[in-house]
Image: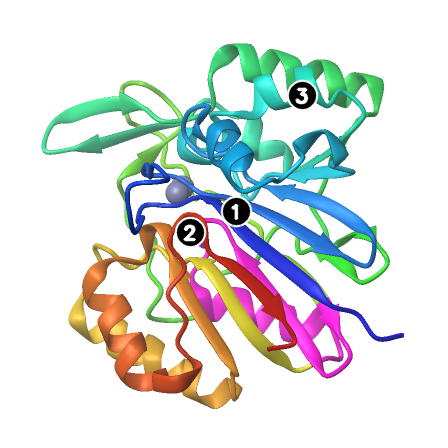
Amino acid sequence: MKRDISITVLVTNTVFGPKFKAEHGLSLWIEYGGKRILFDTGQSNLLFSNAGLLDVDLTKADAVILSHGHYDHTGGLNRFLKIVPDARVYLHPKALDRKFSQKDGRIREIGMQSSTRHTLLERVREKTAVETERPTVVFPGVTVTGQIPRISEFEHYSGDFYLDRPCRTEDSLMDDQAMVLDLDNGAVVVLGCCHAGIINTLQYIRTITSKRISAVIGGMHLSNASESRVKKTVSFLNDFNIEMMAPMHCTGFSASVALKNAFRSEFVECPVGYRLHLPL
Ligand SMILES: [Zn+2]
Ligand SMILES: [Zn+2]
């Protein structure tokens, strides 16, 4: 069956023109095979005003997928679930953990709001939220990876994330997951923050799908990565024969430039309001 996908950027860090607003966060609206999926919900309620401007009818959502539990991916979830109570939620159980970061001596709580956590715990109990520790089929052709094994030698855990306020217990962010959409000639990979590492993520996806990876879209969490890690990442990505590379959100300026230089015509910039149609 021939399948077309459209992906509309509701929230990311960049915007062109005065019409939309941006924020540090991610939210994507995906239409695939008659199904509508909200992938992450940004940091605030910004996704609702941007969706209105883009004629995206959020009430038609069949499912909402959370890439992980950080505040910049879960901020609009509570309001969304009030508007669309029948949408099934997919999340890794560790997304519900309290989460903290420590940078320059400053400790911040960076997990989801406690009201959102309560809503989700209730939904897990009611079985209207699905916990995805392992690869899980959301709809035919749409899979979430669940937990991603950390295999790569150079995609080191950053060390700034913790599970407790005193910052004694590291959070290895095992809740981080990606979504895979099957097309006839390949798989489209949609990333949230990609804390697991882009190479770990793509190598794992290779083991759970027989399709080649044809497109990679989303946050790649390389904003604080060393030059050598970015170089190794780009050279690894070259082995995948990717036809569309669309970094956004937390990929970072230097890494985005390196990817643009490496992928050239396959590189797509995706600010808020951009709508991608695949196959291209
Ligand atoms: Zn994150
Ligand atoms: Zn993020």
**Of the pair 234 and 17, the residue shown nearer to us:** 17
As displayed, is residue 156 above or below residue 74?
below
As displayed, is residue 146 above or below residue 11?
below
The answer as to whether callout 2 falls within 8 Å of ligand 1 is: yes
Q: Secondary structure at mark 1?
A: loop
Residue of label 2: 195
Magenta segment includes 209: yes
The answer as to whether callout 1 falls within 8 Å of ligand 1 is: yes
Magenta segment includes 129: no
Residue 74 location in percent, x, y? 50, 29
Q: Are marks 1 and 2 in contact (CB under 8 Å)?
A: yes
- Earlier sequence position, callout 3 versus callout 1: 3
Q: Name the quarter showing ligand 2.
A: top left
Closer to viewer: mark 2 or mark 3: 3
Residue 183 falls in image quadrant: bottom right
What type is the residue that disc 2 sits on? His
Rendered-image quadrant of the C terminus: bottom right
Closer to viewer: mark 3 or mark 1: 3
Q: Which mark is residue 176?
A: 1
Q: Which residues are magenta?
A: 182-211
Q: Secondary structure at mark 2?
A: loop
- Earlier sequence position, callout 2 versus callout 3: 3
